[in-house]
Structures are given as C-alpha cells and as structure tokens.
Amino acid sequence: MKRTKFIFVVLTLLVGFNLQSQEQAFQFIDGKTSDKIHFQLINNLIVIPIVVNNMTLSFILDSGVTKPILFDNLNGLEVLNSENKESFFLKGLGDGLVVEAVKSTQNKIEIGKAVKHHQTIFAIYNGSMDYTPKLGVPIHGIIGYDVFKDFVVDINYRSKYIKLSKPKRQDGDLCRKCEKIPLKFHNSKPYIIAEVTIENKQIPVKMLLDTGASDALWLFEDASKDIVSTDNYFQDFLGYGLSGGLYGKRSKVEALTINSFILNESLVAFPTGESIETLKKIKDRNGTIGAEVLKRFHLTFNYKESYLILKKNANFNKAFSYNKSGIDIEHHGVRLIKNYNYKLENGRLVYEQTPAATNYITNVNPQNDFRLVTVPAFEIVNIRPNSPAQLIGLQLGDVILEVNGSDVEKYTLQEVIQLFKGPDGKKITMLVERQGKPFLYEFYLKDLLN
C-alpha cells in the first residue's frame, strides 16, 4: 500500500532534498577509470543523456539538486520501478501551492560507461516543471549530487563535454592559469566564498554553485551586509521554481570576484517572495552563482577532496546580456504551414523537406502546388510591463510566425531568444498570429541597465 506524506522543503533554483541514503556509488564498467560524455548547452544548461531502467532520457546536470528528479512529461510511459513507491507533497520556490511527488527506489541508472543500481528517484507531477517547452528540446529530469559525489567532474563548456573520472587526490602543481578553490557543503550542495562590488563596496558573500541556474548571479538582499540593489534595476520574471513563477529585481553589480578572477558588470537578480526569505536563513547563504558565470570557466569539481579548480576560457570576457524585448516565449505544440518547396524529378512533383518540419500531412493540393507540414509553435507566455514588446501591443498567447523577415521554422527556440539579447536599439520586426489572424509589429530593444 502506498503511504502519503506531507513534506514541506525549500529548494535552491529547482529543488533539493535533505535526505540521507545508503545507496551504492556509480561504478565504471569494462575496467574504465574515466569517460567523456558530450552534452547540449541550451540556455546555459547542460543537457546529458541518462539511461533510466533501460530507457534513454535527457537530464539537466544540476549541482544545486541532491536527488534525481523525473518530470511527468513521458506521455504515460512507465520508467520508474513500480515497487517501493511513496507519495509526497512538496513545496518549493515559486508563488504556487504544494505539488505532488513520488519517491521510487531500486532504479538502475547509467551515464556513459558508468552504472548505478538501487538509485532513488523522485517524480514530480507539476506542469510548470516541464522544461521541454521552455528549452525547446525534450527534458525528462535533473540530476546532480549523485554524479558529483562519485566522480571528479570536469565541465568543458566550450567543447561541450563532461569528463567523469574516479576520485583521486590532486598531486603536483596546477596548470599555470588554474586556481584551486575550497568547497563547503550544506545539504550536499557546494558553496564558495566570493566577493561582489556594489557601489564601490567590496562585500564577501557565501554563494551556492548551481550549474542548473541559467542566470549569472542571484543575491538575497540584506541591508545589514550592504547587499542591496542600486537604483539601476527593473522588475522582471526570473524563471520557474517547483511551486511556480519567480520574480525579482534585475540589475548589475560592479564586479564579481572569485579568487583572482574578476568579472566586471555582471548581471544579478534579487529574487523576492516568501520562499526566498526562508532560503536566506540557510547557513549565511547570500545567493547563487549560476551558469552564465560558470560557463566562462573550465571547471573541475572534486567533492571527495572538497575543492573546485577554475580556468577561464574564451567566454570569460564576453559581455553579459539579457532579454531586452520584455517577452518570454516557449515551444507550445506545432502549427500548420504550406510548404511550397518542390522540384520536378522524372516528370513528378517532389516536395523537399522543410528543415524544421516535424511531420508531414500526406494530403497534397496539386492545383496550388503546396502541401501542409507541421513546425514548432513559439508562443508568448510572459510579457514584462512597460517593455518594448508590451508597449507596441504584443499579447500573451501570440504565436510568432516571423522574426526580422525570416520564418521561425528556420530557428530553434534558443536562436529566437538570442535575437532578443541583442544590443540596445536593435530593431525587431515580428509577425504573429492571434486568433487566426496575422499581426505585424516593430519595436526596438531597450537596455534598462545602460
């Protein structure tokens, strides 16, 4: 019989479970001592293939989460071990209520050439935690501590791979441009001491390192420590937590300093809300360093020896950017278009495949020389008040057809979003569909932090 428990936990960006486990560790097969796994980098997030009970899925590698989490977006496919399940209700970051979850034990999980049996996995039944529409590719879950604790984990953001190695003590000298930083842990999550400069004040901060947070920095406002936003900020939607949407102030700090590495004019968010107030009480935590900062380094995590090695990469000096349009878009289903791409072969009309098409409808209209195909639908799901997009008349639910004269079927979701991170004053033209009718808009990106 299933047992139902009511557990209220506070999460980092996504979710964290303060649960102890006697599970075995990951083990390499075939006598290997290391393995390299290539990943997709989408919105700064590392997406790796994970095999759960012989089914290949896509997981975000998230150093801010303690137990693997499976999202309820598998269309009813049974992935987890059906035995030894317990139901929970969890509350985390966001403005929503508690959500349902299931704890499943005795699962087999494989990452590259490493395997682990008897893995505990949590399944979350909450549509807001479905990252597939937000990232534009299938995302089935997140995994963190179970990988980091069992391996030395090298993350190469430039070449898009992680290397998992058996833990060993760091012997000899570091590379000339590398720096070794001690890690502290709370609830199995890694923290470092860094420094932020706000209004010419250099302030030491204790920061969670979170590869699953796409932003650069989150800081929790604390006037007693001079951690406060300046007048140069705007209110923004920051993303999703377990219990719903997250909001706060978006601004800049004059500098973020990690050992001798100095990142100037770093973006920062000051999240607000009841759940954030609780997070502030966790072991003097001042905030989070996310992947917009971490991707500027080659990283080596060694949890066993409690250190991190940093080496800056070619991303280091790139300017920080953010979405200046004021709209957030997601991949919501598909839309039908007429495909006029055709050619004659041996006297027959042959239709060429549209690159972004996901499916073809077999009916062809020879009189008009087109066929219907389905392509991704990119829908506006959030609009910042008084933003360029909102002031020009764009609305929630608008489906984007064209950006700057090009059909969005030629873009991935992330490529469209990247257009919104262009320079101040960049012109954007956008054709949208609203209630079956087309509307054309033109606006200019505006940097509110200039």
Image: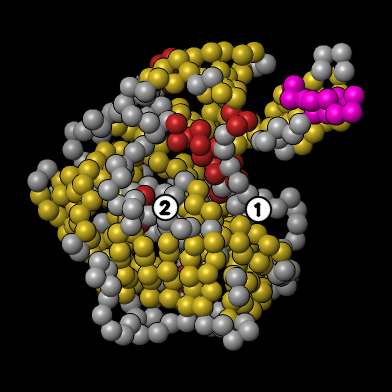
Query: N-terminal of the two: label 1 or label 2?
Result: 1
Rendered view: 74 above or below 378: below
> Is residue 160 visible in the rendered structure shown here?
yes
Which residue is painted at 49% across and 52% down in the image? 41
Residue 342 shown in magenta: yes
Rendered view: 364 above or below 7: above
The amino acid type, in three-letter code, at marker 1 is Asp
The part of the chain drawn in magenta is: 338-351
Tell me where residue 348 appears, x and y as whole percent: 89, 26
Residue placed most toward the observer, 83 or 324: 324
The amino acid type, in three-letter code, at marker 2 is Ala
Residue placed most toward the observer, 344 or 289: 344
Q: Residue furthest left?
A: 200
Which residue is painted at 57% across and 38% down in the image? 412
Q: Residues within 10 Å of mark 1 (few under 14, many from 20)?
A: some
The residue beneath circle 1 is 72
Of the 4 image quadrants, the one containing the C terminus is: top left
Q: Residues within 10 Å of mark 2 (few under 14, many from 20)?
A: many
- For residue 8, side relative to residue 49 (left or right): left
Rendered view: 275 above or below 62: above
* Marker disc for residue 213: 2
Q: Are marks 1 and 2 in contact (CB under 8 Å)?
A: no
